[in-house]
Image: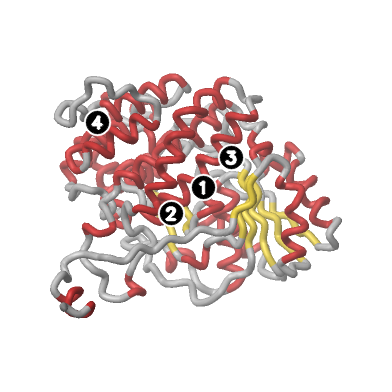
């Protein structure tokens, strides 16, 4: 009988190991009231609560701080997290807080606040190193976080990024007009505390854009290059967080797609629908449990330069003090064209994703189904007032070279695409999205 070692040596051409991770999760309406209990249970006596100005104006951070203080825990508040944070905004915040000493962190808000909390935990724990050292190559040096970070509880107030469940952050890079990320298991929150009631005050536009992020997270991770269709990694340390579609991530992606198809329209069109808000909060966390391990690909790679190169666009429902393309709008604007491109690699998966979102597959064949998922996405986005393409953000054909160049810098994402992606492929996808 062939030995185990011999069997592996005879089949060295593909990866065989699945890695999967997620933080503990506490979920439910009213869960925010248990934040102080969870901090005290972890032995934390002082925290930095990180949030954004918009949320601070609504009073939620103040109420949360009081609940934490009732457990005998001292609370410092940083309420100036930037919507779509940058390396510079995080560096400046860390500089202002350099003298602060706390036992742990709370990230309260959307993905921007939670990512800022992750970055402050890193920069204050290990001062002296620049943010760009940690950024993923080729934009940054990809330096590993040198040691453990302090406990961080993530409390999302949007149903979108899923940052409460992932070991990564997304940052704009000052001076380069592009976004990229940091991926490191030490960035994973100690606890994801998800309370759907916190999303009830979101404007429809923010609800929609957050939902588009969930939608594309699930579609991209579900269609990513499978983990066992990649060459083996030279060592366990070389295995990335984004390993490709796998049986574990598929479970979470499928659940997220089903929930988005059922609840996104309702959450946008009736913001007080708590059942829909609960469903979308579940979808956001579930999608993060999928993509945080499987990865994303073309829509997210294109979204970073779409957001980074924006000139004048100011979306409804967001702060109007600077131009920006919300991340969810940026990712969904190229999704239809991207999934038509990836369809031949796994037609059955693309059709299954569309079916989970609510598409009727009656009469659809594998040979003729390439537009089913794209059409399903377009319908969902149209019904919720989202972008038909990238032209509405102010882009034209003359912007394509810069957008292509920015997307091609996101190699950690593009390697997750089930097809090899060339510059010409990215240009075609962006041009189709421009026409859309």
Check disc 1 and report the residue beneath it: 162
Quadrant assignment, res 37: bottom right
Q: Which residue is depicted at the point 36% across and 28% down?
A: 377
- Mark toward the start of the polypeptide (2 vs 1): 1
Q: Are marks 2 and 1 in contact (CB under 8 Å)?
A: yes
Q: Which residue is depicted at the point 38% across and 62% down?
A: 136
The alpha-carbon separation of the residues under discs 2 and 4 comes to 33 Å
Check disc 4 and report the residue beneath it: 397
- Mark toward the start of the polypeptide (3 vs 2): 3
SS of the residue at dot 4?
helix
Q: Of discs 3 and 2, which sits in the foreground?
A: 2
Q: Are marks 1 and 4 in contact (CB under 8 Å)?
A: no
The alpha-carbon separation of the residues under discs 3 and 4 comes to 33 Å
Q: Could you say which disc has been placed on residue 158 in the image?
A: 3
- Mark toward the start of the polypeptide (2 vs 4): 2
Residue 402 % position (x, y): 28, 43
Q: Which residue is depicted at the point 29% across and 44% down?
A: 223
The alpha-carbon separation of the residues under discs 1 and 4 comes to 33 Å
The alpha-carbon separation of the residues under discs 2 and 1 comes to 9 Å
Label 1 CA crowd tier, 10 Å (few <14, some 14–19, many 20+): many
> Is 405 on the left-hand or right-hand side of 46?
left
Image quadrant containing the C terminus: top left
Residue 387 % position (x, y): 40, 26
Q: Of discs 1 and 4, which sits in the foreground?
A: 1
SS of the residue at dot 3?
loop
- Is 168 rendered above or below residue 402? below
Check disc 2 and report the residue beneath it: 292
Q: Of discs 2 and 4, which sits in the foreground?
A: 2
């Amino acid at each position: 009988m062939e030995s185990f070692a011999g069997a592996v040596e005879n089949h060295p051409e593909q990866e065989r190991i699945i890695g999967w991770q997620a933080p503990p999760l506490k979920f439910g309406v009213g869960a925010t009231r248990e934040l102080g209990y969870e901090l005290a249970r972890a032995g934390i006596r002082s925290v930095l609560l990180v949030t954004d100005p918009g949320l601070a104006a609504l009073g939620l951070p103040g109420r949360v701080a009081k609940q934490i203080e009732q457990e005998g825990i001292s609370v410092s508040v940083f309420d100036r997290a930037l919507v779509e944070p940058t390396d510079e905004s995080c560096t400046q915040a860390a500089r202002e807080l350099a003298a602060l000493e706390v036992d742990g962190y709370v990230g309260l808000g959307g993905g921007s606040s939670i990512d800022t909390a992750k970055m402050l935990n890193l920069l204050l724990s290990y001062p002296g190193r620049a943010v760009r050292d940690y950024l993923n190559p080729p934009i940054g040096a990809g330096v590993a976080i040198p040691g453990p970070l302090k406990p961080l509880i993530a409390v999302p107030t949007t149903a979108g990024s899923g940052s409460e469940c992932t070991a990564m952050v997304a940052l704009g890079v000052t001076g380069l007009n592009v976004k990229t990320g940091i991926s490191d298991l030490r960035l994973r929150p100690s606890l994801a505390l998800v309370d759907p009631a916190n999303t009830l005050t979101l404007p429809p536009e923010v609800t929609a854009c957050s939902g588009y992020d969930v939608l594309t997270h699930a579609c991209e991770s579900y269609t990513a290059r499978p983990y066992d269709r990649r060459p083996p990694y030279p060592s366990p340390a070389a295995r990335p967080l984004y390993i490709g579609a796998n049986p574990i991530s598929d479970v979470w992606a499928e659940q997220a797609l089903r929930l988005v198809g059922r609840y996104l329209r309702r959450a946008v069109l009736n913001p007080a629908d708590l059942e829909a808000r609960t469903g979308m909060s579940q979808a956001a966390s579930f999608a993060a449990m999928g993509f945080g391990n499987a990865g994303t690909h073309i829509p997210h790679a294109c979204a970073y330069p779409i957001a980074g190169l924006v000139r004048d666009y100011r979306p409804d429902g967001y702060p109007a003090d600077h131009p920006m393309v919300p991340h969810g709008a940026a990712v969904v604007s190229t999704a239809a064209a991207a999934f038509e491109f990836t369809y031949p690699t796994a037609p059955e998966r693309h059709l299954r994703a569309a079916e989970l979102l609510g598409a009727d597959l009656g009469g659809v064949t594998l040979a003729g189904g390439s537009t089913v998922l794209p059409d399903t996405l377009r319908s969902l986005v149209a019904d919720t007032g989202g972008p038909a393409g990238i032209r509405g953000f102010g882009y034209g054909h003359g912007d394509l070279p810069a957008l292509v160049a920015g997307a091609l810098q996101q190699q950690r994402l593009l390697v997750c695409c089930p097809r090899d992606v060339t510059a010409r492929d990215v240009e075609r996808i962006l041009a189709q999205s421009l026409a859309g």
